[in-house]
Amino acid sequence: IVPIVMAGVLGIYGLIVAVIITQSISTPSSDGSTSYSVFNGWSHLAAGLCCGLSCLAAGGTIGVIGDSGVRNFGLKATCGKRFWDGESEGMEGDAAQEAKSVEDANRLYVGLLIMLIFSEALALYGLIVALILSQNTYYCSAV
């Protein structure tokens, strides 16, 4: 469930950037003039792309890490026995081997969480850069 929650946070990052960009867009006046410059448009596009592409990269890594981590964690926790393997049903498990298997599974889970945290950091860096980009503004002056 950890990869699913971490992937959900990526959507919240995009929502934060979208709300900040939307708040800085001004409507044109009645005569058609606007204070929203081309510079602001490109800056907001760059902020959205920065957040979106970094979240895309982080989502891909979270998916790959989550998939392989869950599969390997399950394999380690069951001492390598698979439920569809008919040969492993009759075997009795040694208590020492099962304890070692649980310890190895816990070690694998800690490594899985660390990799997920670092992949989430990719999106966090993109969010920070997007926030910095969205704060750069240039207002057109009335001539």
Image (tube, rainbow, N blue to C red):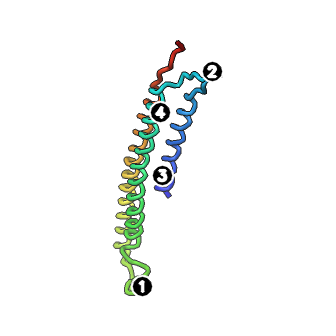
Earlier in the chain: of badge 1 and badge 3, it is: 3
In this rendered view, identify the residue nearer to me: 54 or 92: 54
Q: Establish if 13 lies above or below 23.
A: below
Q: Depth-wise, is mark 1 or mark 4 nearer the camera?
A: 4
Earlier in the chain: of badge 4 and badge 3, it is: 3
Crowdedness near tag 2: few (<14), some (14–19) or many (≥20) residues, C-alpha within 10 Å:
few
Expressed as whole percent of the image width and height from the top left, the position of residue 106 reads 39, 61
Asked if the residues shown at circle 4 and circle 2 are in contact, with their CB atoms under 8 angstroms apart, the answer is no
CA distance separating discs 3 and 2: 45 Å
Residue on which the image places disc 4: 44
Expressed as whole percent of the image width and height from the top left, the position of residue 58 reads 40, 49
Residue on which the image places disc 2: 31
Amino acid tagged 3:
Ala
**Considering the numbered disc 4 on the image, is that residue within a helix, a strand or a loop?**
helix
Q: Depth-wise, is mark 2 or mark 1 nearer the camera?
A: 2
**Considering the numbered disc 1 on the image, is that residue within a helix, a strand or a loop?**
loop
In this rendered view, identify the residue nearer to me: 73 or 47: 47
Crowdedness near tag 1: few (<14), some (14–19) or many (≥20) residues, C-alpha within 10 Å:
few
Amino acid tagged 1:
Glu
Expressed as whole percent of the image width and height from the top left, the position of residue 130 reads 44, 35
CA distance separating discs 1 and 4: 60 Å
In this rendered view, identify the residue nearer to me: 107 or 13: 13
**Considering the numbered disc 2 on the image, is that residue within a helix, a strand or a loop?**
loop
